[in-house]
Amino acid sequence: MKKILALSLTFLLAICSITFISCGQKTARSSYEIECKLVDNLIEGKEKVTFYNNTENSFTSLKFNLFANAFREEAKYKPIADQYYNRAYYSGESYGDMQILKAYDQKEELEFNVVGEDQNVLEVNLNKEIFPEESVTIFIEYTITLANVIARTGIGENTINLANFYPILCGINDGAFYECVYYASGDPYFSDCADYLVTLSCSEEYIVASSGEIKSSKVEDSIQVSTYKIDNARSFCMVLSKDFEILSDKVGDVEINYYFYNDSLATRSLQTAKKSMEYFQNTFGEYPYKKYSVVQTDFIQGGMEFPALVMISDDLEESAYNEVIVHETAHQWWQTAVGNNEIEYGFLDEGLTEYSVILFYENHPEYSLSREMLINQSEKTYKLFCSVYDKLFLKVDTSMLRSLKDFTSEYEYVNVAYIKPCIMFDNLRITIGEEKFFASLKDYYEEYKFKNATPDDLVSRFENRVGEVHKYFNSFFEGKEVI
Ligand SMILES: [Zn+2]
């Protein structure tokens, strides 16, 4: 995600009360075949999930995150942070939910329960044990009621955002399913890569942007039914609008589509997406999919990344719009391809993504943003944060190895997970030199593409090239660095 901080003293004081809190490479993967029908604000869905057990443990049940259930009225963790509430719920209070109707395998119905800290997890009992390297196929029928909210999932005034529109297998962490609570701040995601085949039925009036490549499409009685496919993806997302215009271009074999409804500089926006795709491919490694969709949406925050599709808020200042496109494009390398547990260490993808934006601008002088200017700005912003926290709380915790729930505000999270890592990477680059710095990042991408990486994995790729650097990284990770 790209967060745009508009800082005022009132905001700085207000935020003090706001709390918020791996893909294993394998020859076989889990897969989803999802069929869903959208009518008004209701989705009726059915998914066939094949879980491939690439762990050393056996499983007698499967667990799925039910992110769309975070929008129900009685949710313990509100999906929208207080400071964004009124803007996000543009038509007043609105709620949604996710109901699980039925779970079954090829033989029989399966017992299931909605569990977790905030009714955020579906557990389906399998009636058998799935051993390592075995797979199991089950079916889940469900409904989702969409709230009127400009979030990852919801109905906006111009678009319908359909992230999290299906039960998604919890990511595997240390051989067990990792449950994600839908925190309002940060990106509360952790999942393994899988193959997706998604069929959406909706009014023919909608133009659909999706993570996948279109495989078939037909219209009957004003209803369009289209099937999309993507392999080796961490999730699947769609955005619908009756007003989308589309501009397209190519980078090598990769097709880039820009969906928009209110952008007087649309050609420039597409060019920024194209240039960043070219630059990151050359700098980090090949983009892993055949299609990339940049989608202008009703979205409360700056932007949000999904595999092969990114949301860009229609509510951004002109100067921020390009930056968010570059940021979300960089996430295709850091988060979409190289995944990580975004709840336990969100800085791993956000920090590298934010530094990738600086690299992009440094190499594209036409945007008039130099490396020196951006690093100076990062240092100033970070030092201001330290002094504000010092004054307000008489101490500042800058440790990066913290769970989302342990950050006291979005202001703290952005400074620690986005801005501070830019300083960390830039200082490292100066110390070890250009060649080893970029070779290490290429190694990291190549080694952990389609897997989930940890901070130690990142450090190990640098150590492989330059020798001992873990003390340097640890000083930043643990908040003991001197800036
Ligand atoms: Zn981000």
Image (cartoon, helix red, strand yellow):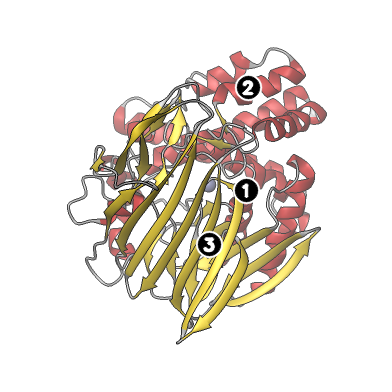
Q: Given the image, on which type of amino acid does mark 2 rest?
A: Val
Q: Which label lies toward us, 3 or 1? A: 1
Spot occupied by residue 368 in the image (x, y as percentages of width and height): 72, 56
- Position of residue 42 measured from the top left corner of the image (x, y, whole percent): 31, 69
Q: Which mark is residue 310?
A: none
Among the two numbered marks 2 and 1 on one chain, the one whose residue lies closer to the N terminus:
1
Pick whichever, 146 or 475, lies toward us. Answer: 146
The residue that label 3 is drawn on is 312
| Disc 3 from disc 2: Cα separation | 31 Å
Location of mark 2 (residue): 459
Q: Which residue is mark 1?
A: 332
Q: Secondary structure at mark 3?
A: strand
- Front-lying residue, 149 or 353: 149
Q: How many marks?
A: 3
Q: Is residue 308 visible?
A: no
Task: Residue 91: tell me if it is visible.
Answer: yes
Q: Earlier in the sequence, mark 3 or mark 2?
A: 3
CA gap between label 3 and label 1 equals 14 Å
